[in-house]
Amino acid sequence: MAEPLFRRLALLGVGLIGSSVARIARQRGDLAAEIVVNARTQKTLDRVLELGIADRVEIDPAKTVEGADCVMLCAPVGAFADLAARIAPHLMPGAILTDVGSTKQSVIRDVGPLVPEAVHFVPAHPIAGTEHSGPDAGFTELFQGRWALVTPPPGTDEAAVAKIEELWRRCGSMVERMEPNHHDRVLAIVSHLPHLIAFTICGTADDLADESRQEVVNFAASGFRDFTRIAASDPVMWRDIFLNNREALLEMLQRFMEDAQAMARAVRWGDANYIEDKVERGRRIRRSLIERKQA
Ligand code: NAP
């Protein structure tokens, strides 16, 4: 077994993502010699102890990070500013502070200014997830064959960035570096807009008159069913993502609405070629995902 990358890994937040990292660290043994975990509630920490996925749990974020050479923020992005303020004075000189947040410019904006001079700040985002949350939702294969995007601000210590990249490789991810604003635009179209559409379509169906609503449930075809799976995601996490990737999300939504209008026009005027062309394009995108094993 390779040497552990870190002596002590502190996870702040232990839901789907944090608990998956903890499980992998436990199973492999070469991510960190010791795992310390923090959550907002004692209930979650008790569950972590029952699951046996941490060496130690701490309800106080400041205590969690003491002596840790890697600190990973795994809470919803809206909680990062407060968490960072609470842990900043307790971070060990030379430690790496990283995160798994789904938005990157907001994390750099909220956390960056609070990071002490002697601490390396390496924001990252594993592009892997399910609609489930909490410490029971995690599993060791979550990041297998998925991308992890690393978005270090200019001037970040290269050795610190390399260690976070290696951490994600050991979690099974393929790693790529990206500019934070490019990250936010890409994620707006591949993840944030699809979630917005899923939440909206479920709301639209739910607003229908009572008897139609019952039929929606009874006869849900696969199209609607797939939307409900996405819409089952955690409300706090998604509230925070929408509010923290506002500009890119609104831009992609605007483009989408224009394209949806064009489709509506084609339907109204019986433009069969337009409709067929759009469906064919969708099929091509699906085929290329399958070929790249990202489906
Ligand atoms: P989750 O399952 O809902 O878990 C959230 C964890 O953060 C819990 O342990 C919670 O503690 C803790 N927490 C601390 N402060 C909190 C606060 N103020 N509000 C709510 N929870 C707080 O979340 P997750 O799905 O692992 O997501 C964690 C992070 O990963 C988010 O930043 C998200 O954007 C990012 N991410 C998510 C996915 C995905 O698909 N889920 C994918 C990639 C990245 P308690 O249990 O005690 O409340």
Image (cartoon, rainbow, N blue to C red):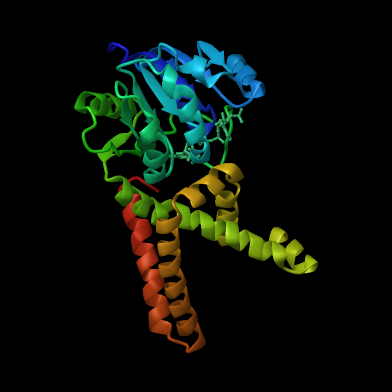
Residue beneath the point at 67% across and 22% down? 43
Residue beneath the point at 41% across and 44% down? 106
One can see residue 221 in this view = no
Question: Is 45 left, or right, of 101 in this rendering?
Answer: right
Quarter of the image for residue 273 reads: bottom left
Residue at the far right: name it: 210
Please tell me which residue lies in front, 48 or 213. 48
Question: Is 211 left, or right, of 134 in this rendering?
Answer: right
Quarter of the image for residue 120 reads: top left
Quarter of the image for residue 6 reads: top left
Question: Is 39 left, or right, of 180 in this rendering?
Answer: right
One can see residue 121 in this view = yes
- Measured as percent of width and height from the top left, residue 246 is found at 46, 55
Please tell me which residue lies in front, 97 or 139. 97
Question: Is 37 left, or right, of 293 in this rendering?
Answer: right
- Measured as percent of width and height from the top left, residue 17 is found at 48, 32
Marks counted in the figure total: 0
- Measured as percent of width and height from the top left, residue 49 is found at 59, 14
Q: Where does the N terminus fall, quadrant-wise?
A: top left
- Measured as percent of width and height from the top left, residue 239 is found at 56, 48
